Image (cartoon, helix red, strand yellow):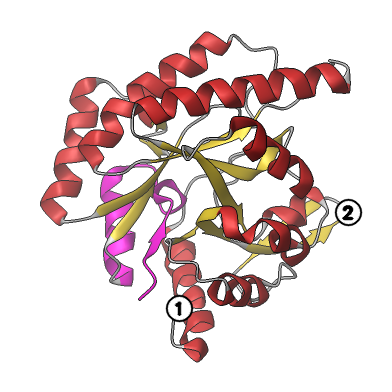
């Protein structure tokens, strides 16, 4: 059976709210991004110990940790040493959590010539993959912000340049709504490289994406799931509904347990006809 999970802070700020929503769905896995509004790598040792201890006590599996490395909040001109430091912290914390997967992106541009942006982004991804391989981690590049975020052929190029088993892909079904491409078209040439999946859905509006329950928007979540199944995908499906929390936006909001649970039930309904 497919492992179902969700990014916890989409359900609530505190860990108690996050695990309660997972429990309400009857699921046994979680994806971690922030706890009490603090990124996992920035938690104090004491705070992280509480997180790891609670998850172990509840028997909750961590399927992935979402880092800030190369993401929408940073830029290609940012001090690379900060990202390497975050990776070192997460290498230890992932070991405690029992996961090897760390979500990354490939650095938004910051006024550089496109050729220079490409050169720096690929160089950084090669170095990150090499460090991850040494630490027995797998970096999962998401189709979101950065040089390879919305162009499938760039993603292929990035994987070829890194040439490492420590760099694979995270496919988010809804990101095409925000970045202007059909999800299935983006997925098709990359499906064999996908090791983790985020589930969200929405519709494009003149004011930006309007997020919906999975299956209620225009992302063709069902088509994406069918393609993944056809190609033997065996990783987790992790909901990131954005119904209340929108990390990219200035007015971010906070997680909603009700919305999170509703999104989880909608995903289950999409999976039920195929017996997944």
Task: Name the spot of residue 236 as percent of width and height, x first.
Answer: 42, 61
Classify residue 62 as left or right of residue 162: left
Badge 1: how crowded within 10 Å, few (<14), some, or many (20+)? Answer: some
Vertical order, 78 against 115 (above or below): above
**What mark, if any, has residue 115 been given in the picture?**
none
Q: In front: 20, or 99?
A: 99
Instruction: Tell me the quarter of the image containing the C terminus.
Output: bottom left
- Please check the rendered image and state whether residue 76 is part of the magenta-colored stretch, yes or no: no
Q: Which residue is mark 1?
A: 268
Badge 2: how crowded within 10 Å, few (<14), some, or many (20+)? Answer: few
- The image quadrant that residue 98 belongs to is top left
Vertical order, 23 against 54 (above or below): below
Q: Is residue 249 visible?
A: no
- Please check the rendered image and state whether residue 21 is part of the magenta-colored stretch, yes or no: yes
In the rendered structure, which segment of residues is drawn in magenta?
Answer: 1-25
Task: Name the spot of residue 131 as percent of width and height, x first.
Answer: 44, 22
Dot 1: element: helix
Task: Name the spot of residue 210 as percent of width and height, x first.
Answer: 72, 59
Q: Farthest residue in the bottom direction?
A: 273
Classify residue 15 as left or right of residue 67: left
Residue at image point 46% right, 37% down: 166
Dot 2: element: loop
Task: Name the spot of residue 188 as percent of width and height, x first.
Answer: 71, 64
Q: Which residue is mark 2?
A: 206
Classify residue 47 as left or right of residue 6: left
């Amino acid at each position: 059976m497919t492992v179902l999970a969700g990014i916890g802070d989409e359900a609530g700020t505190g860990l108690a709210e996050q695990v309660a929503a997972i429990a309400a769905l009857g699921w046994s896995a979680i994806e971690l991004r922030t706890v009490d509004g603090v990124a996992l790598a920035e938690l104090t040792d004491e705070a992280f110990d509480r997180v790891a201890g609670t998850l172990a006590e509840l028997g909750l599996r961590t399927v992935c940790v979402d880092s800030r490395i190369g993401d929408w909040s940073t830029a290609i001109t940012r001090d690379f040493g900060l990202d390497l430091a975050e990776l070192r912290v997460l290498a230890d914390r992932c070991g405690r959590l029992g996961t090897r997967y760390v979500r990354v992106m490939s650095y938004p541009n910051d006024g550089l010539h496109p050729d220079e942006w490409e050169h720096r982004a690929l160089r950084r991804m090669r170095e990150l993959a090499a460090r991850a391989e040494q630490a027995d981690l797998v970096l999962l590049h998401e189709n979101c912000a950065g040089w390879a975020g919305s162009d499938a052929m760039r993603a292929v190029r990035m994987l070829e340049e890194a040439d490492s088993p420590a760099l694979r892909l995270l496919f988010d079904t809804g990101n095409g709504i925000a970045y202007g491409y059909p999800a299935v078209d983006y997925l098709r040439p990359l499906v064999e490289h996908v090791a983790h999946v985020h589930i969200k859905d929405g519709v494009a509006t003149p004011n930006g994406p309007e997020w919906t329950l999975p299956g209620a928007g225009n992302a063709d979540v069902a088509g994406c799931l069918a393609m993944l199944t056809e190609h033997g995908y065996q990783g987790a499906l992790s909901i990131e509904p954005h119904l209340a929390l929108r990390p990219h936006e200035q007015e971010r909001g906070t997680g909603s347990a009700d919305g999170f649970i509703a999104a989880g039930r909608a995903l289950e309904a999409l999976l039920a006809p195929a017996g997944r």
